[in-house]
Amino acid sequence: MTGRGTGGVDRRSVLRSAVAAGAVGATVAGAVSASAGTAAAGGAQPTGADSSTTEPSFHGVHQAGVLTDKQRCAAFVAFDVTAADRAGLTGLFRTLTTRLRFLATGGVPEPLGISAPPSDSGVLGPVLPTDGLTATLAVGSSLFDGRFGLSGHAPLRLRPMTAFADDELDPAWCQGDLLLQLCADNADTVAHALRDLAQHTRGAMQVRWRIDGFASPPRPSGTPRNLLGFRDGTANPDVTSARTMDQVVWVVPSLGEPAWATGGSYLAVRLIRMLVEFWDRVSLNEQERMFGRQKDSGAPLDGRVESDPPHYAADPTGDVIPMDSHMRLANPRGAGSDALRMLRRGYNYDRGTDGNGNLDMGLVFCSFQQDQDRQFVAVQKRLAGEPLVDYVTPFGGGYFFVLPGVRDGSDWFGSSLLT
Amino acid sequence: MLVGGVAALLAAGIGAVADGGGAGPAGASAAAVGAPGGGADADYSGLPHTAVQVSPGSCGVGWTRPAAGLQVFDLTDTGTAAEDAYLETTAGAVLAEVEGLAPGRTRPVPVRLGAGSYRFQCLPQDTDAVTGPTVTVTGGAGSGPAVVPVTQQDLIPPTLAYQAWVSRQLPSLIADVDTLRAAVDRGDLAAARAAWLPAHLDYERLGAAYGTFGDLDRSINGTTRGLPGGTADPGFTGFHRLEYGLWHGEPAGTLRPVAAQLATDVRTLQSSWAQAQMDPKDLGLRAHEIVENTIQFELTGRTDFGSASSLATARANLQGTAETLTLLRPLLQTRLPGLAQLDAAMAAADSELAGLGGVPLSGLPTGRRERLNAVFGQLVTELAPVAAICDVRRTS
């Protein structure tokens, strides 16, 4: 029984004292889920009212790091596979499984005596904590070229990301044979995991691009804010509903995907630079009309609180919530809008400054969906030309497919694909 | 020669947990493992602990309840001198080591034990080694890796052979440098550019990683690192200074004194090498440091001052590494289970370079560059245990 501590210091101390007092579980979790319900925000965000007080499990039908409450720190690392053949790829997936199983479980790194340098960097101390670590492994369409005998086995809708109308994609920041999403409650845990994987996979894969992200705590409550100051992820579907997740996130047999892909999910990653200094020189009214929400509370422009639904029927010409606002374009809440829903699980990034001395920060947009075209691509097309595009520059990312989960101690990543 | 720094690194690795003090028994704080902010894991809470004495008079005392599995020995130097200590099999293969344990201090040493017979060996500073009682462990799923220590005596023959090998390379280095110098002297800069590469590769083949040749290496093969004036700094000399000049249109007159100094330096190298005594511990370090240097300086293009010959240099470095491995092979054969993988990684790196030919590093497309980085990354991974195993240890 350990607290994941996604809500920051306050929540940790609350949990610790609860544990110390023996009031583990029911009281804390009960109080927490009651408040989570009112947020109507779904689970994939580091709300202070985090209903999960258990470590994410490494084993399962689905991978962790998708429905898992968003941890505070993340790294998104795209790799190209350099292994020579199918056996090499299989070895790589087995190695990744072994290492990530250990890292996600914690414990004492294997002592190697005088036979080698230490098996662990020691960055997390002599006994590895789990620290909420999740590793989510996804594959890109390039893995299904001829190198590994996988052509013809790709998920139906998997392809390279092509530029949308307002993109400025840099090929060096796009795609990859694999994408690994590492998330944990602290940055040293993320860095430690990546270092461990690098040590064990140097010959078999090489980093193509990498970006680190952070999730903000609720300010002051509700869904965390992005670096434009607006709450991001408010209308996420309910991750606690298995039925909803089977309609939104997970690949199910009825979608006609290859059998091995069942239990997986499409992952769209978009690296979106936000021109935050430009944004800060824009009036509040204009900012709010671009999003369709109030900046302070996150409420729709026609509502009072974040969880209020917008009433588009009462505002057919967009006098209150502009027709081209981000919120209204993305989800018009009409017939068929349900099919567009996806699970957003993005992270803020901050990469210092660019060559002109301007602040280089933005969003690692991340969405999980069972049908890339029906959900992510359709929404993205609806957003074409929205006023917000003047303030953001998508420059990288890619389309990936999250492999089904590692079921148990003898299973491994990609076993359904490679055997 | 770099001795102190790397030795300290190795020692730090061995004693990864510095000074556990009164590392107590496991139990109370086990629940804190994995908890945010739960700090009581520095004593390996959750693992069985055994307190064992390390001293000439009580070597191994305290190990009364042998058990299989992952566990921690809290070793206390109960003598009056600093001690090294091994936990070893009765065949003398070491599973765990503590180095330089101070009198009165305790350090936790984690180890995995399977069925077998083990003992402690205590090696007090300046005194003969003492062996503790043999302890038999039953059950368990296998032990951690055990390696018979490499001694100074073991390393002297290959070290002498390595010195002799370097000596045999030096005449062709001198001859090729003289060819280079002659071309510069007569103002034939095209010939000088052609002569520069073979001479430089002669030197790179020697495996001069981490100052094997001391200050002379700086003069012969230094870069602009640490030079306030950069490429214009008077301290910038040797191969890379010539390279910079030859590939940046400098006149022969500017380069003549540089070539002359280089010719002098390689002769000084030859005479000083004949008298040098290489520290036996350096051979194992050399085996992995050469390629570490290749990755750091050649595969990044950092040492390219115009000739675009980084990949050729990398191949010369591999040849130098291969020589160290050839000489260490008799010691590694029984100690390095990954020797076959190491051989394969050496072959893969060489084959990748051979396949690339003489192309400039900067011209490699992403995929080729990734493959190159992958084979070298795998190679240094396989080489890392060589230095650890070939560290000089006492056995008596």
Image (cartoon, grey):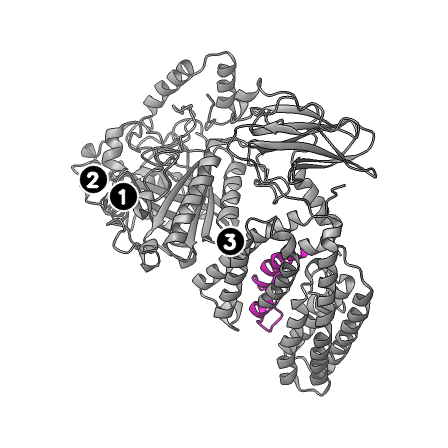
Kindly identify which chain the residue marked by label 1 belongs to.
A
Mark 2 or mark 1: whose residue is earlier in sequence: 2
Q: Which stretch appears magenta?
A: B285-313
Tag 2 near tag 1, CB within 8 Å = no
Residue found at x 39% / y 54%: A174
x and y, in percent, of residue A197 in the image = 49, 45
Amino acid type at image mark 2: Pro
Res. B92 in view: yes
Between marks 2 and 3, how big is the CA–CA gap? 46 Å
Kindly report the secondary structure that dominates the magenta region of the rendered protein: helix
Residue occupying image coordinates x 61% and y 25%: B66
Q: Please state which of the two labelled residues, at mark 3 or mark 1, is closer to the viewer.
A: 1
Residue type at mark 1? Ala
- Dot 3: element: loop
- As helix, strand or loop, the secondary structure at mark 2 comes to helix
User: Which residue was labeled with disc 1?
Assistant: A261
Residue B341 is inside the magenta segment: no
Residue denoted by label 2: A253
User: What residue does disc 3 label?
Assistant: A354
Secondary structure at badge 1 equals helix
- Hey, which quadrant is residue B233 in on the image? bottom right
A38 shown above or below B263: above
Distance of mark 3 from mark 1, alpha carbons?
A: 40 Å
Of the two numbered discs 2 and 3 on the same chain, state the one appearing first in sequence.
2
Give B289 or B156, whichever is nearer the viewer.
Answer: B156
Q: Mark 3 is on which residue type? A: Asp
**Chain ID at mark 3:** A
Relative image position of residue B303 (x, y in whole percent): 63, 65
Q: Left or right: B290 with respect to B124? A: left
What residue lies at 56% left-to-right and 53% top-to-bottom? Answer: B339
Chain of the residue under label 2: A
